[in-house]
Image (cartoon, grey):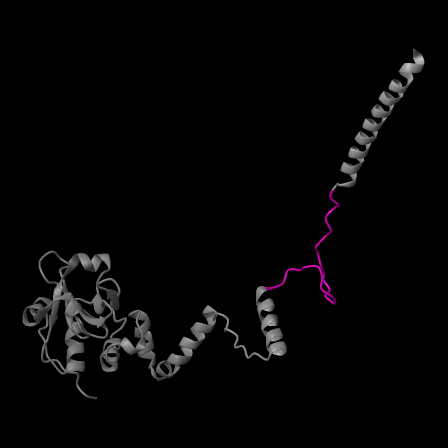
Amino acid sequence: MVKQLLPAIIVVFFLSSCSSFKSLNFTSNKQVGLLPEPVSQNKFIDNISVTPSTTVDKTTVRTETQVTLETTRGINIVETPAEKKESDLLTELMESRKPVLEAASSVQLKYAILLNTEVESLPSKTLLEKVDDWYGVHYRTGGNTKTGVDCSGFTVAVYAAVYGLMIPRVSHEQYRTSRKISTTELQEGDLVFFNTRGRGVSHVGIYLGNNKFIHASVSKGVMVNGLFEPYYLQRYVGAGRIDDKQIVSN
């Protein structure tokens, strides 16, 4: 009986052994079939050295780059000039105006400051010199000399010296006889009138330009003020022009 079953047992044993071998072989094949690790694709350029980066001024980098290009490639590069400093611009401006400033008299320079304007925009030199003869003279009611002068006495003296004209002695009469003009029409030498006492025109000055006029003020004598200063703006009546005034030649 055992002898009869022995061949069958051997066959079963053999088949089971083959199955194990196949399993082992399959596992082995899977392990062998794993993809290899990727090979690095990085390449390095020969004869190139790398140095640590440092902080460099942008202007220097730009200049060195341009020099390198010009040297290695033969390219002519014109550098963009750096922005000019404010001090350099001021120097250039002063240099361009130097001939005008050198030709200006001390009186013109004085009134360029008082009127806050350029020398080229000043009134005629004759007018400036004549009004400046009175600059700083003290105020005196009814006065018409350089020991003391009032507002209308000052305008009478200047008009006689500059234009050779005799105008009325008092301010309200000067207003009455002058041709009325708007403030936007004002020119050098025109008269500007104010109501400082509440009874009509009581004060007068001579317009010099840039909204400034010269007059004999009660508090400080002959001086320059602005039409738009609050005190004078509130008391401003209007402006007048003597049409036949022409500067008398020296």
Residue 112, image quadrant: bottom left
Residue 197, image quadrant: bottom left
Q: Which residue is drawn at 64% across and 60% down?
A: 55
Q: Which residue is drawn at 22% across and 79% down?
A: 127
Q: Is residue 58 magenta?
A: no
Q: Is residue 36 magenta?
A: yes
Q: From the image, give the main secondary structure of the stretch colored magenta.
A: loop
Q: Where is residue 9 in the image (x, y as percent from the top left)?
A: 88, 18
Which of these two is toward me, 97 or 57?
57
Report whether residue 204 is seen.
no
Q: Is residue 11 left or right of residue 132?
A: right
Q: Which residue is drawn at 44% across and 73% down?
A: 89
Which of these two is toward me, 236 or 81?
81
The tally of labels here is: 0
Q: Where is residue 5 in the image (x, y as percent from the top left)?
A: 89, 15
Q: In this view, does 124 lie to the left or right of 49?
A: left
Looking at the image, is 26 positioned above or below residue 122? above
Q: What stretch is highlighted in magenta?
A: 35-57
Q: Residue at x 53, y 75 (%)?
A: 79
